[in-house]
């Protein structure tokens, strides 16, 4: 923003996000199909209720 002399950071940000942190163009983050995970060799660990200690 400073280098281009723009009035707003929104004019120069490469990947703009909404206030909720989502991308309007790709709708990320979103759910992933189990087939996609298998293709990439990714396994998800079960989350623990209450968070990590």
Image (tube, helix red, strand yellow):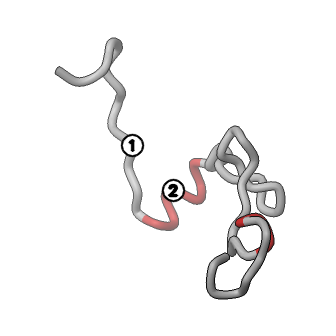
In x, y percent, where is residue 49?
Answer: 35, 14
Disc 2 crowd, CA 10 A, few/some/many (<14, 14-19, 20+): few
- Relative height, residue 12 to residue 9 (above, below): below
- Circle on res. 34: none
Residue that label 2 marks: 37
User: Which residue is depicted at the point 65% across and 45% down?
Assistant: 21
Q: Give the residue at the far top of this rendering.
A: 50
Quote the CA–CA distance across marks 2 and 1.
9 Å
In the picture, measured across the screen, residue 19 lies left or right of residue 25, that is left
Quarter of the N terminus within the rendering:
bottom right
Quarter of the rendering containing residue 52: top left
Q: Give the residue at the far bottom of this rendering.
A: 3
Residues marked 2 and 1 touching at CB (< 8 Å): yes
Q: Of residues 19 and 49, which is closer to you in this image?
A: 19
Local SS, label 2? helix
- Whichever of labels 2 and 1 marks the residue nearer the N terminus, that label is 2
In the picture, measured across the screen, residue 53 lies left or right of residue 50, that is left
Marker count (numbered): 2
- Relative height, residue 44 to residue 1 (above, below): above
User: Which residue is depicted at the point 47% across and 66% down?
Assistant: 40
- Relative height, residue 20 to residue 6 (above, below): above
User: Which residue is depicted at the point 72% across and 41% down?
Assistant: 19
Disc 1 crowd, CA 10 A, few/some/many (<14, 14-19, 20+): few
User: Which residue is depicted at the point 71% across and 66% down?
Assistant: 9
Q: Of residues 14 and 25, which is closer to you in this image?
A: 14
In x, y percent, where is residue 41?
Answer: 40, 63
Quarter of the C terminus within the rendering:
top left
In x, y percent, where is residue 26?
Answer: 77, 61
Local SS, label 1? loop
Residue that label 1 marks: 44
In x, y percent, where is residue 16?
Answer: 73, 62
């Amino acid at each position: 923003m400073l280098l281009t002399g723009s009035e707003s950071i929104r004019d120069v940000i490469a990947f703009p996000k909404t206030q909720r942190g989502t991308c309007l163009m790709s709708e990320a983050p979103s759910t992933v199909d189990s087939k996609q995970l298998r293709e990439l060799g990714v396994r998800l660990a079960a989350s623990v209720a209450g968070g990590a200690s």
